[in-house]
C-alpha cells in the first residue's frame, strides 16, 4: 500500500452522494431512500448473481419472482420446475441449494435471519452472500466484497499484490471503509461504482466520485490494478452425447442430483473424464459434430451423435417434440441440441 492512501472516513459520504444520483435501476433493488429491501428478493438476486452478470440475471429474476413471489412459494415449488427455470444460468448447485435454503427458511417461519452467523448456516449462503443480505436487507454494517469491490479497493489503496493472494488484505481495507449508517446503500454503491465507472479496463477516473482520494490514479496505475496471478491452463476433457428420437419424441434423462449440471434435463452422455459408457440404445448413431463448453475447472469437447430409434429403452424419459423447449436445458445441452437438430 502506498503512502498516499485515502482517508477512510471521507469515502462513504462521497460515494453515497454519488449513489443517490446515479444508482442503477435493478428489479431486485430498492432505490436510495426507498425503505427496507425484501430479504427474499435480496437473497434470490445474490444467489443468481454469483458468477453471473447483471444483464443475464434480470430476466431470470423477473420470471422467478413472478412464478414464486415469496419464500413459501419457492419452497413449495417442484424441483424439476425450478431447475427448468434455472437452465442457462449455470452452476446448477446454486439452484439445488436455492431450494434447500427456501425450504429451511419457510419451515422456520419464512423470515431470513438478520444475524450473519445464522445466515451462514443456511444452504448455499457463504460469507459474501451473508454479508450482502445483512447489509442490503437489514442495513447492518457488514462489509460486502465482490469482484467489483475488490477492484475499487485495490485501486483506492494501490494494492499491488496479485489476486487471489491479495483477497485478505482487500477485505481488511474494505472493512475500514464500511459506514455504520446506510450500510446497504453503501454496499450497492460500491458495486455500482465498480460496474459502471471503476471498470476492469479503461476506468472512467475523470468522473469518479472518489478520484481525488484514489492513490492508484495519483500514481498512474489505476488501469493496471488489481493485478492477477497467471491462471493455469484448463485441463481438456472429452465426452459423447447421444441425441435420439423415438417417433415424435426425444430421448432425454434427468442428471443425478449431485455433480456437474446436477438435477438438470439432459441428453444421455458419457462421463466427461474419458470413461466409456454404452449408448442408451442400439442404433445407427451418426456423428453430427462437436460441442465445446468451458466449466470452472476444465474445458469439455462433447462429440454429438444422433439417431432414430426403433424403440425406447426401458425406463427412458421421452419428451414429445411439441412440448420440448431447448430453454429447459443447461447451456452445454443447448449446444448439443443445436448441433444435432434431429
Image (spheres, grey):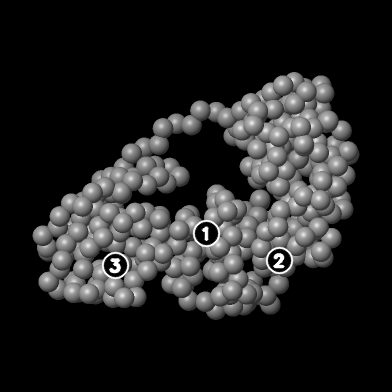
Q: Mark 1 or mark 3, which has the lower sequence index?
A: 1
Give the structural element (helix, strand or loop) at label 1.
helix
Say above or below: 146 vs 34: above
Q: Residue at x 31, y 75 (%)?
A: 322
Question: Is residue 262 rendered to the left or right of residue 41?
Answer: left
| Residue 159 in sight here | no
Look at mark 2 in the image and give the residue it sits on: 39
Residue 221 found in image quarter: top right
As drawn, the label of residue 94 is 1
As drawn, the label of residue 252 is 3
Say above or below: 309 vs 331: below
**Residue 77, image x and y in percent?**
52, 76
Q: Residues within 10 Å of mark 3 (few under 14, many from 20)?
A: many
Q: Mark 3 or mark 2, which has the lower sequence index?
A: 2
Q: Residue at x 67, y 68 (%)?
A: 40
Q: Residue at x 49, y 64 (%)?
A: 86
Q: CA distance from mark 3 to mark 2?
A: 37 Å
Amino acid at each position: 500500500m502506498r503512502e498516499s492512501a485515502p482517508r477512510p472516513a471521507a469515502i462513504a459520504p462521497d460515494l453515497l452522494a454519488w449513489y443517490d444520483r446515479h444508482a442503477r435501476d435493478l428489479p431486485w433493488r430498492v432505490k436510495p431512500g426507498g425503505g427496507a429491501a425484501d430479504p427474499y428478493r435480496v437473497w434470490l438476486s445474490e444467489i443468481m448473481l454469483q458468477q453471473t452478470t447483471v444483464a443475464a440475471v434480470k430476466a431470470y429474476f423477473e420470471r422467478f419472482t413472478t412464478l414464486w413471489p415469496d419464500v413459501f412459494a419457492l419452497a413449495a415449488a417442484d424441483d424439476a420446475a425450478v431447475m427448468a427455470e434455472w437452465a442457462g444460468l449455470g452452476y446448477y448447485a446454486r439452484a439445488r441449494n436455492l431450494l434447500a435454503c427456501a425450504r429451511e427458511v419457510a419451515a422456520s417461519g419464512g423470515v431470513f435471519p438478520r444475524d450473519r452467523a445464522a445466515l451462514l448456516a443456511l444452504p448455499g449462503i457463504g460469507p459474501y452472500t451473508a454479508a450482502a443480505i445483512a447489509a442490503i436487507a437489514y442495513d447492518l454494517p457488514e462489509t460486502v466484497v465482490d469482484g467489483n469491490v475488490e477492484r475499487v479497493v485495490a485501486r483506492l489503496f494501490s494494492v499491488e499484490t496479485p489476486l487471489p493472494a491479495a483477497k485478505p488484505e482487500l477485505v481488511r481495507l474494505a472493512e475500514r471503509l464500511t459506514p455504520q449508517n446506510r450500510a446497504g446503500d453503501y454496499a450497492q454503491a460500491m458495486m455500482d461504482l465498480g460496474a459502471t465507472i471503476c471498470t476492469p479496463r479503461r476506468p472512467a477516473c475523470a468522473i469518479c466520485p472518489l478520484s481525488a482520494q484514489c492513490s492508484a490514479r495519483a500514481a498512474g496505475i489505476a488501469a493496471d490494478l488489481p493485478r492477477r496471478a497467471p491462471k493455469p491452463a484448463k485441463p481438456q476433457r472429452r465426452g459423447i452425447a447421444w441425441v435420439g428420437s423415438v417417433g415424435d419424441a426425444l430421448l432425454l434423462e434427468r442428471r443425478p442430483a449431485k455433480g456437474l449440471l446436477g438435477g438438470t434435463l439432459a441428453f444421455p452422455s458419457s462421463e466427461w473424464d474419458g470413461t466409456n459408457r454404452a449408448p442408451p440404445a442400439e442404433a445407427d448413431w451418426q456423428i453430427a459434430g462437436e460441442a465445446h463448453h468451458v466449466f470452472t475447472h476444465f474445458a469439455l469437447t462433447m462429440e454429438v451423435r444422433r439417431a432414430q430409434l426403433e424403440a425406447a429403452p426401458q425406463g427412458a424419459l421421452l419428451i414429445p417434440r411439441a412440448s420440448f423447449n431447448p430453454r429447459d436445458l443447461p447451456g452445454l445441452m443447448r449446444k448439443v441440441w443445436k448441433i444435432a437438430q434431429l
